[in-house]
Amino acid sequence: MGNAVSSLLAFIVAISVLVAVHEYGHYIIGRWSGMKVLRFSIGFGKPIWKHVGAGEDRTEYCISAIPLGGYVRFLDSREGAVDPQDKGRAFDQRPIPARIAVLLAGPFFNFLFAIFAYWMLFVYGVPTVKPAIGEVEPGSYAAEAGLESGDRIVAVGDTATADWESALVAMLDRMTDDGRVPLRLEDANGSQRSVIIDVGNDKTRLTEPGLLFDGLGFHPWQAPVMIADTQSDGRAAAAGLMAGDRLISIDGEKIQYASDVSAAVAPRPEESLRIEYERNGRIFTKDIVVAADVQNGETRGLLGVTVSADWGDLAYMRKYGVIESISHATARMWSSTLFTVRMLGRMVTGDVSIKNISGPINIAQFAGASAQAGVSNFLGFLAIVSISLGVLNLLPVPVLDGGQIVYQLVEWVKGSPMSERAQLFGQQIGIFALLLLMSFAFYNDIANMIG
């Protein structure tokens, strides 16, 4: 219940921030273009807060009851008579280039926000892990290509890969193009070699959420979980475990992450657990009765160790100066935007699974998880969603900004607005397309919830 509430709150915050940014782009460029703004609303439906601005425009600024979007309402002569003193200030009475600028401003501000978010991340510092190969499944695509545990991915094709994010983006891009993923690998001795993972016609299936690594047959290398310290009076120390021991499993459950230790021990106070660990290259097992620790009326199992993951030189903090971060943030936004556009195009051609279309439930879960993981993760999530929002709004669908831009271009070319019948037909097609997209998104959300 708590996770659901936190996910919902994170989702509302994310949507509100990104919609405010998007609509502010329309609003401020409209104001600069001489248009009269009647209302600026975050959310739809009945306003729960309203403020009327000063000046002759008397713009209404609202927060409305349904936090799933927002809008800017301009004065428009197509919706009613315009007062003589406002003549020429209605949206449809301004020059077509000004109207197009206003429509472009919303997506443009989403891209600007992504640059700002990435800039903050680069200034603050982004924890980064170099792309190294962990376990390789025998008989898999990866094994047939010659990948080995411990190899580091130096490049995918011509794209250098300094971290897992850039490696994954490049791998997906190449795989969905022709089903082949060319890799430049470096082994533990520093020797490099080139391999090609060829998945052929299986590429679409492998783009389904969560299937890439299992489908290719390898997983990212995980740092071994080590005992950093033991409590002198703890059960682990009494059993002979020492700092520097590598934890392999607890009661048969493999330990991959530091969090796996508390997850295995906390629910089982005063129970005997079999601990498998490695010391100086030798494997040992010990049966340890877990201590009971009572805090705030809750009893939890306690082993009496502090653990950490030893990443060695594979983990580092990527951080740039205030000025230098601008160019890196801009490049990151641009590459993410191009990748988003390519993936959308390949969904249309069937090269990428439509199961990647996420609805509000999945987005809320991602928002909640990223918010709980920290400010940096939430900022990265906001940047990605902001880019997606910008790209989607530029699609030539009549009810979106991109479709409205098409209407303005047609009017510019023919010298008069499109007929109401043509505009209505276009809007009907646009609504149908959006409903179809939303249906896929909700279906995917429900399918993910039920496994």
Image (cartoon, grey):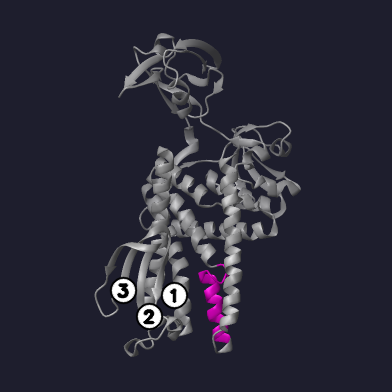
Residue at left 52%, top 66%? 393
Determine which of the numbered discs, if any, sits on residue 149 in the image. none
Q: Position of residue 342 (x, y in %)?
A: 61, 59
Residue at left 33%, top 19%? 294
Q: Residue beneath label 3, please?
A: 59
The image quarter containing residue 219 is: top right
Q: Earlier in the sequence, mark 3 or mark 1?
A: 3
Q: Position of residue 424 (x, y in %)?
A: 57, 76
Task: Give the residues drawn in magenta, as a range.
Answer: 395-413
Query: How far apart are the two marked residues, 3 and 1, measured between alpha carbons?
Result: 17 Å
Q: Position of residue 117 (x, y in %)?
A: 40, 55
Q: Earlier in the sequence, mark 2 or mark 1?
A: 2
Q: Is residue 361 visible?
A: yes
Decide: is 367 above or below 325: above
Q: Secondary structure at mark 3?
A: loop
Q: Secondary structure at mark 1?
A: helix
Query: How far apart are the two marked residues, 3 and 2, measured between alpha carbons?
Result: 12 Å
Residue nearer the viewer, 444 or 114: 444
Classed neighbour count for the residue bearing mark 1: other residues with Cα under 10 Å, few (<14), some (14–19), many (≥20): many
Q: What is the quadrant of the N terminus in the image?
A: top left
Decide: is 257 above or below 300: below
- Tag in front: 3 or 2: 3
Q: Is residue 63 left or right of residue 209?
A: left
Q: Are marks 3 and 1 in contact (CB under 8 Å)?
A: no
Residue nearer the viewer, 175 or 235: 235
Q: Residue beneath label 2, please?
A: 35
- Amino acid residing under circle 2: Met
Q: Secondary structure at mark 2?
A: loop
Q: Residue beneath label 1, please?
A: 102
Q: What is the quadrant of the C terminus in the image?
A: top right
